Image (cartoon, rainbow, N blue to C red):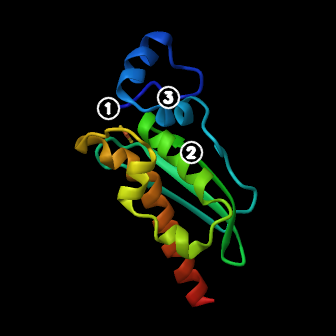
């Protein structure tokens, strides 16, 4: 269930039915994604994919004293996954890693303020799962160092 993407490829005919389905938050973050792109020297960079559709989201973080100093994401996904990645990267900047690790599935779903169907929950959680996996991998590297 792929969308047409978000880089100006959406047409008005697609946006009208989308507006009826999604919250203002999802539409806003999908149309104007925050923190899209890459960091020059990320401390964490992890890409995950949704096995149901193959869409991928990469999350990158710059950390300073266990606080997220900067965050970026990139990838190709549906409106829900792009909006969730945009919102998530916006919310975690300036946050302690421990608090980021404590973000729950239900918290992110609720922050999107939309009635996300069970079949699309995986879309919303894709960036959060990439973030968690990136943090886990970073921790393992810290332990090895
Ligand atoms: Fe692929 Fe939503 S349809 S992430």
* N-terminal label among 3 and 2: 3
Q: Nearer the viewer, residue 62 or 21?
A: 21
* Foreground: disc 3 or disc 2: 2
Left or right, residue 133 beside residue 105 = right
Q: Position of residue 56 (x, y in %)?
A: 45, 46
According to the image, label 1 marks what residue?
Answer: 1
As measured in the structure, the alpha-carbon distance from the residue carrying label 2 to the one carrying label 1 is: 20 Å
Which mark is on residue 51? none
Q: Is residue 35 visible?
A: yes
Q: Residue furthest top?
A: 13
Q: Residue furthest left?
A: 118
- Indicate whether 88 appears above or below 61: above
- Whether ligand 1 has any atom under 8 Å from the Cβ at mark 2 is answered as no
Mark 2 Cα shell of 10 Å, populated few (<14), some (14-19), many (≥20): many
According to the image, label 3 marks what residue?
Answer: 5
* N-terminal label among 2 and 1: 1
Residue drawn at x 48%, y 31% is 24
| Quarter the N terminus occupies | top left
Question: Element at badge 3?
Answer: loop
As measured in the structure, the alpha-carbon distance from the residue carrying label 3 to the one carrying label 2 is: 14 Å
Question: Element at badge 2?
Answer: helix
| Quarter the C terminus occupies | bottom right
Residue drawn at x 41%, y 28% is 3
Residue drawn at x 47%, y 36% is 26
CB under 8 Å between callouts 3 and 2?
no
**Count of marks overlaid on the render:** 3
As measured in the structure, the alpha-carbon distance from the residue carrying label 1 to the one carrying label 3 is: 11 Å
- Whether ligand 1 has any atom under 8 Å from the Cβ at mark 1 is answered as yes
Q: Position of residue 33 (x, y in %)?
A: 60, 37
Mark 3 Cα shell of 10 Å, populated few (<14), some (14-19), many (≥20): some
According to the image, label 2 marks what residue?
Answer: 86
């Amino acid at each position: 269930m792929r969308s047409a993407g978000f880089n100006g490829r959406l047409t008005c005919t697609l946006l009208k039915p989308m507006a009826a389905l999604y919250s203002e938050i999802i539409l806003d973050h999908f149309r104007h994604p925050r923190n899209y792109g890459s960091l020059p020297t990320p401390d964490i960079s992890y890409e995950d994919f949704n096995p149901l559709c193959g869409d991928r989201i990469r999350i990158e973080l710059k950390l300073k004293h266990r606080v997220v100093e900067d965050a970026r994401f990139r990838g190709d996904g549906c409106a829900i996954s792009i909006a969730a990645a945009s919102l998530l990267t916006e919310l975690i900047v300036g946050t302690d890693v421990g608090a980021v690790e404590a973000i729950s599935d239900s918290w992110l779903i609720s922050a999107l303020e939309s009635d996300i169907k069970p079949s699309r929950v995986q879309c919303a959680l894709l960036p959060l799962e990439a973030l968690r996996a990136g943090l886990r991998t970073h921790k393992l590297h810290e332990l090895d160092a």
